[in-house]
Image (cartoon, rainbow, N blue to C red):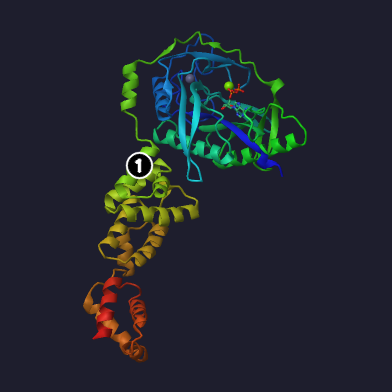
Amino acid sequence: MSLEKYEAVIGLEVHAQLMTASKMFCRCPNQYGSSPNTNVCPVCTGQPGALPVINKKAMELGVRAAIALNCEIHPESVFARKNYFYPDLPKGYQISQYEKPFCTQGYVVVQLKTGEEKRIGITRIHFEEDAGKSNHEAYGTLVNLNRAGVPLCEIVSEPDMRTAHEAGQYLRALHSILRYADICDGNMEEGNFRCDANISVRPIGTEKFGTKVELKNINSFKFVEKAIEYEVQRQVFAIENGEKIIQQTRSWNSAKNVTEVMREKEQAHDYRYFPEPDLPKLVFSSSWLDKIKKEMPELPQQTSARFKAAFDLSDYDASVLTSSKELAKYFESVVSHSKNGKASANWVMNELLGRLNAVGKEIDLSPVSSTQLAELIAKIDSGEISGKIAKTVFEEMFATSKDASSIIKDKGLVQISDPAALENVIRKVIESNPSQLAEYKAGKVKLLGFFVGQAMKETKGQANPALLNELVKKFLDS
Ligand code: ADP
Ligand code: ZN
Ligand code: MG
């Protein structure tokens, strides 16, 4: 196969919905799931004479994104009309930004599975209002304008990615950053974080880009990677077959695992952009920009660095624990109550995430709260229960959401650390195994483990292991 003679060139365009209370140019709620056509007014339904007013919060969130993505912010930018005709666009144009976006030239650092990091350039971010939604039913199409006028940032990357994996990691990094900084809630099912992927291929060693194909609206990280992989192969095979790649827009069919043509270049829109006459130039004062910079929340990379330093975690552990803001918060809460960073990291990553994964739940729906998990860890550290018993207790906590203390009490699982109680058990075990005792006395010292095991079994695993070990040895050697 000739796939390895080619290299893919990939650039992504992401539409991220901004977490504002109201729409971009009117006071209608920015709210998903309301009854159709209830969050509407003369402005966002394009009634004659209605005038837009800029939502300051949307501008602030855009500036935050620009800072988080290391962009150059332009104090002056211009809104533009993007004209096209579609039933879910009542004005006949979208207010967007074109020649003068509010920011350009940023980058994101992404982690690759090779352990390397790669910097992906961001060409520009511009503001844009969303269109409404057309719902295609068997009997016809219904238009819902609740989404019309909802504020978006469109984030355009440089064609810097070379594999589906790199594109997936870029998208994950972007998603995580926007969520950390409370810019976008990132809900992909509700369409609040949407991605178009531009893909071309070229023979390895050549500079010139091939003709690109645009994949529209792919709504999960996994699908983005699969769709790109498929599309790269399709293009290589076509070229090897002597065909020419045609510039077109395609969509991902997740049932068939293929990309399909939506439209060809000849059908491309001419948007006839021009500056929006109903809005002034967008001007950011330097004091306002400084204020936003000062108020920036912590970003994933910073949280990760802080965790590594404070709790002595590996790069990997820190990256897992900061993979989402909710998980990072949960972990911090566990540590603050358990006062044991390493154990908290292990319990969250190995036991809790493992169980959550198995039942397909996210951390915010964990049946075990952070304070409950911290209490369990503290009980191991204080010697009240052994690590082994703790696993049994945890299973029960996960199944019932009960506190560790009530499970330990109900099931009588408290660790036995009373020497007198353990000595009784040990005496019994030694008396009932005379031949092993004789062998031990004759020099087979590794039988110590046998006696400890028997005694542990006798206590149903509740003996304090260190103490038990010490006492068994004392008895055998006396
Ligand atoms: P268009 O004019 O079609 O909108 P742009 O140059 O604005 O194209 O780029 C849109 C997106 O496509 C960007 O993310 C860019 O990085 C990417 N891109 C541009 N050319 C190519 C190419 N030949 N192959 C892959 N991606 C590309
Ligand atoms: Zn409105
Ligand atoms: Mg373009």
Q: Residue furthest front?
A: 205
Compared with residue 451, is residue 273 higher up or lower down, i.e. above or below? above
Quarter of image, ligand 1: top right
Q: Is residue 361 visible?
A: yes
Three-letter amino acid code at the position of disc 1: Ala
Q: Quadrant of the C terminus?
A: bottom left
Q: Nearer the viewer, residue 147 or 374?
A: 374
Left or right, residue 420 beside residue 139: left
Residue 225: x, y in percent?
Answer: 59, 40
Compared with residue 286, is residue 414 higher up or lower down, i.e. above or below? below
Compared with residue 455, is residue 172 higher up or lower down, i.e. above or below? above
Q: Nearer the viewer, residue 397 or 158?
A: 158
How many numbered markers are drawn?
A: 1
Q: Is residue 196 visible?
A: no
Residue 140: x, y in percent?
Answer: 68, 29
- Tell me which residue sits at (32%, 69%) in the image: 413
Q: Nearer the viewer, residue 171 or 424?
A: 171
Q: Residues within 10 Å of mark 1 (few under 14, many from 20)?
A: some
Left or right, residue 158 beside residue 207: left
Q: Which residue is mark 1?
A: 305
Residue 267: x, y in percent?
Answer: 70, 21
Element at label 1: helix
- Tell me which residue sits at (39%, 38%) in the image: 301
Residue 189: x, y in percent?
Answer: 53, 38
- Tell me which residue sits at (31%, 18%) in the image: 287
Q: Quadrant of the N terminus?
A: top right
Q: Residue furthest right?
A: 242
- Tell me which residue sits at (40%, 30%) in the image: 68
